[in-house]
Amino acid sequence: MNGFMKRFLLIMLGIVVWVVVWVAIYDQVNVWLVRHAPGNSAYKLERLLTRAEISETPILGSSRAETCYAPSVLGTNVFNYGISGSCIRETLFHLRMVLARKKSGDIVVNLDPWGFAYYGTEKKSGFAGSYGLAALESNVRKELPAGLVSLSNWLPGIRFQGRLRANLTAWLNARKGVTKKVDHGAALAMRSRTEQEWKVIDATLKPVSFVGPNAAAREELEMIERLLKERSDVRVFWVVSPASPSWKRLYTGKRDLESFLSGLKGQNHVVNVLMDTGFNADDFVDPTHLNLQGATKFSRLLKARIESL
Amino acid sequence: MFLPVVFGVYWFALARSVKAQNVWLLLASYVFYGWWDWRFMGLIAFTSGVSYLTGLKCADGQRHRRFWLVVSLVLNLAILGFFKYCNFFLESTASLLQMLGMKANMPVLQVVLPVGISFYTFQALSYTIDVYRGKITPVRDWIAFFTFVSFFPQLVAGPIERASNLLPQFKRSRQFECDKALHGVCLIAYGLFKKMVVADTLALYVDQAFAHPALYNSTACLLGVFFFSFQIYCDFSGYSDCARGLARLFGFELMLNFDRPYLSQSFGEFWHRWHISLSSWFKDYVYIPLGGNRVSFHRLIVNIWIVFLLSGLWHGTSWTFVAWGAVHAVFLTSGILRRRYWPSLKLPSALSIILVDIGVFAAWMLFRARTFTDLKAFVGRMADCEFFGSMMATCAGLGPMVLLFCFLAVGLLLLSYVVPRDCVFRTTKARVAYILVVSFVTIFFAVPSGGEFIYFQF
């Protein structure tokens, strides 16, 4: 090895060390931001999956859970664990994890009106990498569906607990509500759409049906049913939140959804507000997600329904 | 892992033999290419073989030289035409027949576009043509030639190298030089910064603005065009910088492909600074054989239009790309007319740069919008002149943080222009400091799961 090569390799070693150090610092900055931002997906996963006990009423589900349920309206000890990009597959996994950690009380599970459309398919939910922090726990890791724990969860700085921009936005929202109002994990959109915007959005809508559970999903549901039979101290509420009038007109799965929900009763309680006519376009930020106004209205309605049961 | 292994074996085990180094690079390049899709290794080998053999036959003094040149052109362009343009022409023919009221049952072929085919085909063709013209002597070392066509740093997105520049470097012995290698690392770091920090950040906004222009205001659309202009520049020039940097690590010099194109004072100058390897290829192998500018005025305009329409077609299989080429032909034609009829009309440099940038940025709309329908919707929204509105409408629905990061990304890019290149690359300490600063910025501001390089699709 000649002198020039030695010099080059030494310099490259120094550069690599520099990069590794800053990547580690970047990683820690992200971890700090995540842990101080209740609206952040990675925060929610860590909180949900790594604490020994869950005392609050958790709300589980997708972005529809995250944006449609206002915890401060629902009660005093409620936390919104809705994670954008979750499919029912992830939600059922979280429900099992919660049942293992919750001593007694209520659990709210949001069911999307398209049901099990993506269960067991190749569609990757957007938050899969957010298991980064939570996946450090061995008991969580062994439960995670195959493929969701990957090398990217382990390499410093590449762990996908969020990119700096996204984590910074979530942290700022938690402090000041820059783009969304963060309410105990809920990210409530502070805007509604103009008539012109609705025209464009509605023009892109397509018919949607309800897809029932496949074999793997039925197995998962049976597992949850068995767990609930042993847990008379826990109530699970399956809730279907509202959708916009134009979206509802194209929805073809009403009967299939009701059939599925009626099969859930017994160990569960069902609140189906999907076709409720009390919500108009002003309550929505997009056809399937309520805004702050709509979420407040829906949460009051849900609270009344739960209290009546 | 690929790069350290290739680099290590190349310099530690094979430094004494140029031939061994070439063989190693050839193997590495084919493994690199095969990683994308192993099925197309045969295709690049075939292109290389055809060009190598026809090159031998095209040399001065050979019989039927012109025949073998035609064979090379036909075979290589046929392969490119089939893989890249087959479905485009079938679909266009079907549309035309339907417009004329005729039934069109054209077959739809599931043809996968091999990565880099536009680049390496042009590179191989330039060799055969240069041999025919007597500019270079044909290469007898097939390993050197195959490596020249498939050289992995520039294989998938250029620069399109000339045989006269790159081939002799495969024959020469290469010595490791620390400063040259560090300069290469500087280029790689800068290329990654341009791609992962600037281009991928801007893509977040651009994708939204172009996908749903009707949901946002005219300001969002204008910003979309502005950001896309920098996105495509950083995406493409970032790859070129990485390619040049990687080549330097192995002791090779690739040509400069971008030379601050948005500082051009005329559209002609823009094409001497943007994708230099492609524009010079079209100049040498299409424009000049057509007569160049040594023809009548009208013929000159026709030549320019032919070159730019072909250039547009090279970029993509959609009529929007051809229209983009046509727009640039209009720009150049207007420049020629200005010089012919108003030679005294001269604008201040700054104004010239701004006007050229406005024209170039506006033309990028054709490049970005995939169809004329999308373009119409986008331009229509801009023409509504609704520049003010809600913050969300201006931020393309993404929030002010994304917009802030986009401006920051463009600001960082412009800041990098302020640093004089001679200063940065003069000493080892300056190079190392440059690498450390750029890597720091990239770590904190990169969009890690950003998209593929735009020009990979060509």
Image (cartoon, coloured by chain):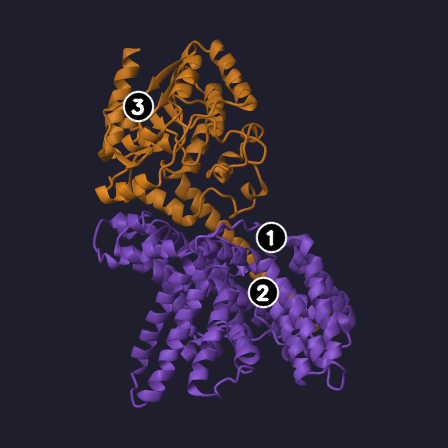
Q: Colour of chain A?
A: orange
Query: Distance from label 2 to label 1 (Cα)?
Result: 15 Å
Q: Which residue is mark 2?
A: B118
Asked whether A249 or A215 is in front, the reply is A249
Q: Which residue: 46% across, 83% down? A: B299
Examine the image and state in which quarter residue A247 appears: top left
Q: Residues within 10 Å of mark 3 (few under 14, many from 20)?
A: some
Asked whether A281 or B422 is in front, the reply is A281
User: At label 1, which amino acid type do we have?
Assistant: Val
In this rendering, the label closer to the viewer, 2 or 1: 1
Q: Which residue: 35% across, 79% down? A: B334
Q: Which residue is mark 1?
A: B111
The answer to whether residue A177 shows anywhere in this view is no
Q: Is residue A226 left or right of residue B388?
A: right
Q: Which residue: 22% across, 41% down? A: A195
Q: Position of residue B69 (x, y in %)?
A: 68, 76
Examine the image and state in which quarter residue B240 appears: bottom right
- Residue B413 drawn above or below residue A154: below
Q: Position of residue A179 (x, y in %)?
A: 29, 43
Q: Which residue: 24% across, 44% down? A: A196
Q: Which residue is mark 3?
A: A275
Examine the image and state in which quarter residue B355 appears: bottom left
Query: Distance from label 3 to label 2 (Cα)?
Result: 54 Å
